[in-house]
Amino acid sequence: MKTRRELLQYAGAAFATLPFAKAFAQAKSSSLTLPGPIVVSTWNFGMQANEAAWKILGNGGHALDAVISGVAVPEADPKNTSVGYGGLPDRDGHVTLDACVMDENGNAGSVACVENIVHVAALARKVMEKTPHVMLVGEGAQQFGLANGFPKTNLLTPSSEKLWREWLKTAQYKPIANIENHDTIGMLALDSAGNLSGTCTTSGMAYKMHGRVGDSPLIGAGLYVDNEVGAATSTGVGEEVIKICGSHLVIEQMRAGRSPEEACRIAVERIVKKNPVKRDDLQVGFLALNKHGEHGAYCILKGFQYAVRSNSQNTLIDGKSHFA
Ligand code: ASP
């Protein structure tokens, strides 16, 4: 029979092995506030998306529910030409969407090159929860969505169609990476139970080749979540992010003890090393949130911003850049 003192020691030791308890102890020792709830997301349209996520997160809700609900805002916004409904089409006039999700248990779901469905982050969640697979693409992803009650919607708005037709006149059908024509929303959240989830959703690079898939739906490239360490997401020229497994690299740098900003800087510098000359068409930004609720970002070219919402912050932050 254990004494009361031994039982207390045992319970204390068990508590100390819980990740949240560790985060709590570190937060206390470094006089930080308690980690979570907090949500971060890419670009200025992240502010509005964070607000929707905060309705769930600020009320003690689950990080996964919060991020799916947050990114549904830009996905449904016809004025946002780089995510969801109203996204700019590929060079053949098809709007094709990419998205993925990860939860605190390391579960993952993804869809790529999907047409006619607005809320592809929610669809990626369905793939994660309802199928034995991680990723569905194209026609199969669309069929799965329609069978699961996602409405069929023409994603090409009249104004996006007009922009595409203008592009066709001068572009000679060449897909061009350009910092004005692509912006993804990646959203990462830490909930009040100390759990992390993330999602990434986009219409990808405007006027891309039909069938092109970027980094955003690829687990480890556009998004990675490890509940012991943190979460990371990316935006920008997806091809460069894929080649370095960008978001996974950021997570591994945080695991090795680096801050979110340092981890993002290392990923950016891997890309810059292969592309050392500054180019206006080569932007990549990484955003990371660690288990302690600390966040940071880094990008190649100036101009990448991210939005933060917590009990003490509701703001847009300029990510530091490699080139001034
Ligand atoms: N990363 C996305 C892609 O390459 C686009 C973006 O974030 O701007 O599809």
Image: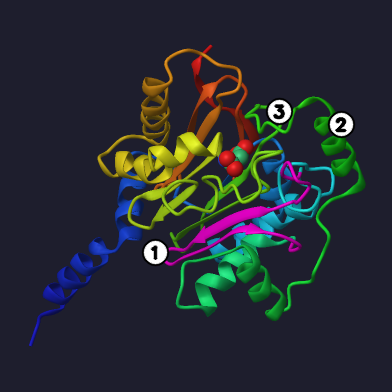
Q: Give the mark toward the camera: 2 or 3.
A: 2
Asked whether the residues under the numbered discs 1 and 3 touch, taking CB atoms below 8 Å apart as contact, a structural biologist would say no
> In this rendering, would 311 be left or right of 264?
right
Colouring scheme applied when the structure was drawn = rainbow
Kindly identify which residue carries mark 1: 106
Query: Is residue 216 at least partly visible in the picture?
Result: yes
> In this rendering, would 135 be left or right of 183?
left
The mark nearer the N terminus, 2 or 3, is 2
* Res 303 label: none
- Secondary structure under badge 2? helix
Between the residue at mark 2 and the residue at mark 1, the CA separation in whole angstroms equals 43 Å
Residue range (magenta)? 89-117
Residue 61's quadrant in the figure?
bottom right
Q: Residue at x 56, y 26 (%)?
A: 283
Q: Dot 3 surroundings within 10 Å: few (below 14), some, or many (20 or more)?
A: few
* Res 180 label: 3
Q: How many marks?
A: 3
- What's the residue type where badge 3 is placed? Glu
Q: Give the mark toward the camera: 1 or 3.
A: 3
**Up-down relation of residue 154 to residue 171 (above or below):** below
Indicate which quadrant contains ligand 1.
top right
Q: What percent of the width, then of the height, locates residue 258? A: 31, 35
Q: Residue at x 71, y 28 (%)?
A: 180
Kindly identify which residue carries mark 2: 166
